[in-house]
Amino acid sequence: ACSSYRLRDALHPLWQSPLSIPGGTRQSPINIQWRDSIYDPFLKPLKISYDPTTCLHIWNNGYSFLVEFDDSADRSVITGGPLENQYRLKQFHFHWGAINEWGSEHTVDSKVYPAELHLVHWNAVVYPTFEEAVMEGNGLAVIGVFLKLGEHHEGLQMLVDALPAVKHKDTVIEFDVFDPSCLIPSCPDYWTYAGSLTTPPLTESVTWIIKKKPIEVDENQLEAFRMLLFTSDGEEEKRMVDNFRPLQPLMNRTVRSSFQ
Ligand SMILES: NS(=O)(=O)c1ccc(C(=O)O)c(S(=O)(=O)NCCc2ccccc2)c1
Ligand SMILES: [Zn+2]
């Protein structure tokens, strides 16, 4: 079932973008085959230190809703894990489906989750701007967290309560204190691989760090995501759902795990 709807989604009007950019050798997302991943004992624990007051606003960019952070200094950063440098948090966003059967970008042994959180960081040690980092192989680091249906998530609810204010494309509201580490599972286990942005410009600049454990959210919280619109106020309404990119070929890559 998953392969057919994935193909359908690849042809889905939203995904005019090609299955992978011509010449792309490290495109994302991918299926993570647990048994093919290689335990790397040299992988360090990921060190996450976010300053909740760097949170700026939530906005609907017509593709997802993004929570953006003040990345003008090293105040919300990650380091360690597979990373050679410290990376600054720029924004986080989600991908989700129209129903709970699909929605995540990455899959684990072909298991699809109803949604996936991405925390986007950039290498401000080496690159002067985010825009430059986006174009470089070690420019970005994105933490991926799977969402599964289960208990109500207190931390997420703060975000959910703000979503009606950003229902339409290009709407924004101030969101001044939020600590995104409440959305990251405490279990330290992750997979990591060299990949790309999953939205244009699809550049091959992302070190992906995919948490093994999902977070639990309840049905109402997922439904709140699905109330958002791709469209601007006054346009014919199109619900913001299925905003994920189809799976891309692994090609000559290995996925490393931080756990045995
Ligand atoms: N799924 S993902 O993590 O690959 C991702 C999705 C969306 C965006 C985004 O900009 O909205 C981003 S982004 O914040 O990295 N922006 C990438 C596009 C961009 C390039 C240069 C300047 C501004 C935006 C990343
Ligand atoms: Zn994303």
Image: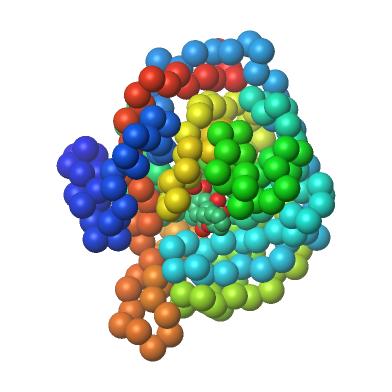
Q: Quadrant of residue 37?
A: top left
Q: Is residue 67 visible?
A: yes
| Image height of 27 relative to 217, above or below | above
Residue 115 point in image, percent of width and height: 44, 49
Q: Quadrant of the C terminus?
A: top right
Colour treatment of the image: rainbow
Looking at the picture, does residue 5 appear above or below residue 159? above
Nearer to me, 15 or 210: 15
Is 248 left, or right, of 157 in this rendering?
Answer: left
Quadrant placement of the N terminus: top left
Residue 77 occupies quadrant: top right
Q: Position of residue 34 (x, y in %)?
A: 42, 20
Residue positioned 33% across, 79% down in the render: 237
Query: 149 or 242, which is in the foreground?
Result: 242
Q: Is residue 250 above or below residue 94?
A: above
Q: Is 150 in front, or is 209?
A: 209
Residue 105: quarter of image: top left
Q: Classify residue 66 as left or right of residue 54.
A: left
The residue that appears at 56% across and 61% down in the rendered structure is 66
Front residue (pair 219, 99): 99
Q: Say which residue appears at 69% left-offset and 51% top-offset.
A: 129
Give the percent coordinates (x, y) of residue 201.
45, 51
Regarding residue 108, the answer to whether it shows in the image is: no
